[in-house]
Image (cartoon, rainbow, N blue to C red):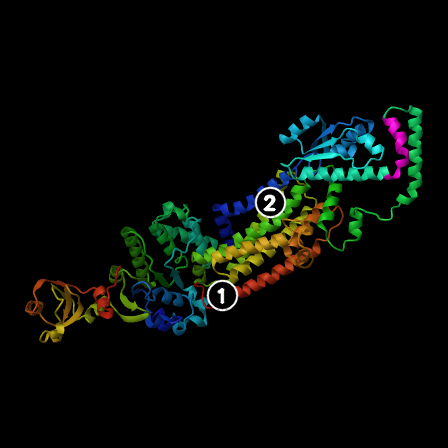
Amino acid sequence: MLRVLLAKDLRRAWRNPLPLLINLLIPLVITALVGLAFGGKSDGGALGRIRFALVDEDRTILSEFLRGAANQREGGKYLDPVIMERAAALREINDNKVSAVLIIPTNFTRSYLTGKSGISLELIKNPAQSVHPAVMEELLGALVTALNAISRNLQSEFPDWQLVVEGGRDYKEISRLIERAGDKLKRAEKFINPPLVQYEKESPDNQAQDRTATNSVAAKSNATETDAKKGNPASEIFGYLLLGMAGMFLLFLASNAMTDLHRELRQRTLARYHTLHQQLAPFVAGKVVFTVVVLLLCSAILLLGGGMIFGVRWRQPMALGLMGFGYACFAAGLMAVLVALIPDERKAGALNTVIGMGLGLAGGCMFPPQALPAFLREHITPLLPSYWFVDTARNLQYSGGEVGWIIPLIKLLALSLVLLALAALLFRRLFRAGART
Amino acid sequence: MSLLRVQGLFKAFGPVRAVDSVSFEVRPGEIYGLLGPNGAGKTTSISMISGLLKPDAGEVFVAGHPFWSDPQKAKRIMGVVPQELAIYEELTGRENLEFWGRMAGLSSTAAKSRAAELLEALTLTDRAQDAVKNYSGGMKRRINLGCALLHKPQLLLLDEPTVGIDPQARLNILEFIRNLRASGTAILYTTHYLEEAETLCQRIGIIDHGRLLAEGTLKEMQDRLGGDRLFVLEADLKDSSPEAWDGFLQRFKVIQKTERQLIVAAVGDRDPSACLKDLLGLPVRIENVTLKRPSLNDVFLQLTGRELRE
């Protein structure tokens, strides 16, 4: 019976696939747009390499050192400096070819080493871009902090260094200066190592040992490290977005599939079924099974297809698949309850969209939960099934260690059962006086 | 024994009495027509008989057993053709029939075989593989009818099965229904088409505002009007009143009077020529007199004072 009902619904969906396709395409398109806006897939990391113009008007050893440091080692993975004159650099930024222009002004080194106040590095950000210029600003802030720290600690050495910079010392003198600086740093070691205040990134091992709460941002930081280690640095932004999109759009797809029951009511096929000797429950159950099957197919298309398109390699596909199944059951149960509560198709459509968006947004599907208002983040979000799914799925993808996905899965399945039982009760009440609406 | 017996059926929606104390029965091999205008209570009656609506009062007996004591058992011998096209437009005609066959309890093989039979009987075999959405209105109606017949129901409830289709398609469906009746199926047929009730049904119930006003065979209905002929007078009747004409109401029963027309039936078994002579002697300037056989419309007119418009 269920098989016949399911076959009928799948055939109908296959022959009229437009509503489902739209709900499948939207998350893929949004993922592509948002992912590309953040740099998309590239070899330099999730954000891609930041191309910026470096204008060295100082032309000293220190400024050359800064120029050279910009694209060495780790810097080279993320930064793509182009050395040019100020006028050319400004043309480049006008043509949107660079994200920012960093200008080392004339006499920068002299002013720095003589301890003059008010010296500055100049940063011109490209107003046509949002992320890369902001990253450049942050990096420059870090550089300025470092330069200030050096200035405060090695101020007494600066006059001698100034002579070096101006070519007034031989190599023997330079080596002595380096040795002196080294000695100073060594003496300072006991004050700076170990530091009084320490910042430590969570390691996968730490996470496995001490997983009290899930934290998407921490997970993402980890992911970047893990990705880098595994030589797959690029695709996490797409994966992160895809999982969030799946969390939200699976609800819309569930609404679409489950409101087929509304269509059956409107087209009187449910009434016709009710004139037969069959009980009503298998028909509703058939629709729930249909919804779950559709959601599983759509999850596969979204995550596997999207994964292939955007180059995401899912790390724990079995666990992710089971979480997807649990979430599909929840979505089908929720929509069944809504259909039973609101037999009017148009009203239900509007409400389902609002509920889907609400669950998606508050559950952290579209934004990291850390970006949500504090009250929502602390008191509401952890209670939402969309959060259970998305957060666990993201952890499965981005945490290198063991992720506790079984408890969220059990929670999703248990809630699904409650919702389905409630839907059955409501449908029974709805049809107690007859199936005519 | 009747296959369907309806007794004192009552349903109200708020202050509106949609069906008010309706009683009738349908016997095997009989087509019982429930004739009435839109909103008369036909569909509500069928909905209560088929279990889609629970009556506020009254009882439905199917094959002698109260419907609500065991609805599933009653439904097994029942086939319902709703007025709306309750079929899946995305599926083919064959798929629709097979699906409803499976839902009616047939095995896959039996549903396939029965679907093929019905496609043949409904002359749809050549379009069996096309999606129903590409069918004409008449073809959709035929599939809609066929979907109720997979399990060979002994009692068939047809709710205006020919509404909105062309005359040729209607004739095809009516012929198909006659064949069903010939095979012994009891059929309850609701319609607002007079000629369908007149030509198809063995017995007819006239329903209006939820009440069954009259029932019987066509002959019995005609007899209610006083015989098998009516006289239609055309004249200027604006200022005339039949009550004022000497002895007129003792000799004729007034069916309808308008400013231009008077329809009457002779009282008793009188000779038509004598009746005609009587009418021509009336104190009005008569322009035309015609004789016609009474129709169900005349019965409806006499019962309600309104015409049953198609």
Judged left or right of residue A236, residue B132 is left
Residue receiving disc 1: A430
Judged left or right of residue A159, residue A297 is left
Crowding near the residue tagged with mark 2, few <14, some 14–19, many ≥20 C-alpha atoms within 10 Å: many
In the image, A173 versus A359, the foreground residue is: A173
Crowding near the residue tagged with mark 1, few <14, some 14–19, many ≥20 C-alpha atoms within 10 Å: some
In the image, A100 versus B250, the foreground residue is: A100
| Count of picture labels | 2
Q: Is residue A26 visible?
A: yes
User: For residue B229: magenta?
Assistant: no
In the image, B238 versus B277, the foreground residue is: B238
Mark 1 residue type: Leu
Q: SS class of the residue under badge 1?
A: helix
Residue receiving disc 2: A302
Q: Is residue B106 visible?
A: no
Q: Position of residue A174 (x, y in %)?
A: 91, 27
Q: Position of residue B176 (x, y in %)?
A: 31, 55
Q: SS class of the residue under badge 2?
A: helix
Residue found 76% across the figure and 48% down from its top: A401
Q: Earlier in the sequence, mark 2 or mark 1?
A: 2
Mark 2 residue type: Leu
Q: CA distance from mark 2 to mark 1?
A: 35 Å
Chain ID at mark 1: A
Q: Position of residue A45 (x, y in %)?
A: 71, 37
Quadrant showing the C terminus of chain B: bottom left
* In the depicted structure, whether residue A311 falls above or below residue A264: above
Which region is colored magenta? A152-165
Q: Position of residue A362 (x, y in %)?
A: 63, 54
